[in-house]
Amino acid sequence: MTRHLTVGAFSPSVLLRTARRLGLLRGDVSEEPVASSPAQFRSLLDGAIDAALTSPDNVLAYRFVPGNPLGRTADVRIVSAVDRGLGLALYARPGLTSAAELKGELIGVDVPDSGFAFALYALLDGLGLRPGDYRLAALGSTPRRLDALLTGGCAATMLNAGSDLRAEDAGAVRLAGVPRPYLGTVLCAVGADPAVRALAGDLRETTRTILRGEADDVVTEEAAKALGLSPATAARYLHRLTDPDEGLVTDGRADAESLSTVIDLRRRYGTAPGKDVLPDLLGEGGR
């Protein structure tokens, strides 16, 4: 009997849903929406989910940094690289047009000591805003932060994976994009789980199918349904998926340069491990 896998994700995975539609999933796989990165990794470490679609910085934190939000670590491994950020960028709420207008405002993050937050701090630094110039609010997952941005719950936040496109459609302003090269999403699990490795292979085959242009209709239909996008915006999402700089990782392997960007951001803005972790992070999912 095929083992059922539950994958925790912040935003609905169009890649996973496309794999299912194309018949490329060899196992029984379901998605579980997660509210925040601590909630996601609590579920992963406790066994409530089998794998996570998450930032590689979370793998770094929950494997090597005992001071992470849960206060515990585990043998969390990158099984496969998935995408290079899918448009990850700093967005200001509709009506704001410059970084200067963010002074004194509330900026939304998942949690303050996490990968997307570190990228946000770097972008704000580049725009001339330093810690103390703005206030932070821990708002959780990307869809939650999008809702907050559009309903007045924050003045700016990091968005990607379709939430960025919805924000643009609603009049939000893209202020700056994430530093590159960058790795946005990985599939991870605790230990060497053969079923998760098999899922990684299915997602890589789906990625190759998408990049060959053989699943355009399925991708746009799934993006529209899962992410609440209009047909035109779903077409933009497809373009984002196939972008060589921001889109899907063809071979599923995490490259050292992109992971180094993630590690360097943590060393600059957060609680970093006390040793060189790049070789361990690369593991079977890297090169």
Image: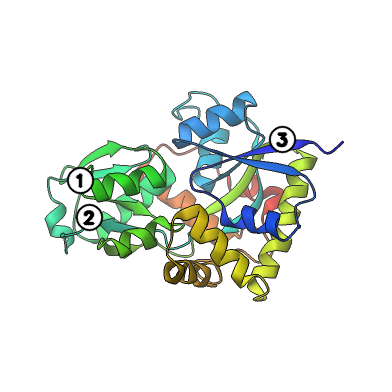
Are circles 2 and 3 on residues that touch, CB within 8 Å?
no
Tell whether 260 sits left or right of 144: right
User: Which marked residue is nearer to the observer: mark 1 or mark 3?
Assistant: 1
Above or below for 6 versus 286: above
| Crowd band around label 3 with a 10 angstrom C-alpha radius: few (<14), some (14–19), many (20+) | few
Q: Residue at x 44, y 58 (%)?
A: 162
> Farthest residue toward the right?
1
Above or below for 28 versus 204: above
- Separation of disc 2 and disc 3 at Cα? 41 Å
**Viewer-side residue, 243 vs 27:** 27
For the question of whether residue 137 can be seen, the reply is: yes
Res 5 → quadrant: top right
Residue for badge 1: 152
> Farthest residue toward the bottom?
213
Question: Which element type, helix, strand or loop, lies under badge 1?
Answer: loop
| x then y, percent, for residue 65 | 50, 32
Residue type at mark 3: give it.
Gly
Are circles 2 and 1 on residues that touch, CB within 8 Å?
yes
| x then y, percent, for residue 123 | 30, 57
Above or below for 116 versus 21: above
Residue for badge 2: 93
| Crowd band around label 1 with a 10 angstrom C-alpha radius: few (<14), some (14–19), many (20+) | few
Q: Quadrant of the N terminus?
A: top right
Question: Which element type, helix, strand or loop, lies under badge 2?
Answer: loop
Give the mark, 1 or 3, whose residue is nearer the N terminus: 1
Residue for badge 3: 191
Residue type at mark 2: give it.
Arg
Question: Which element type, helix, strand or loop, lies under badge 3?
Answer: loop
Residue type at mark 1: give it.
Gly
Instruction: State the count of labels.
Output: 3
Q: Residue at x 56, y 59 (%)?
A: 222
Q: For residue 262, which numbered disc appears in the image?
A: none
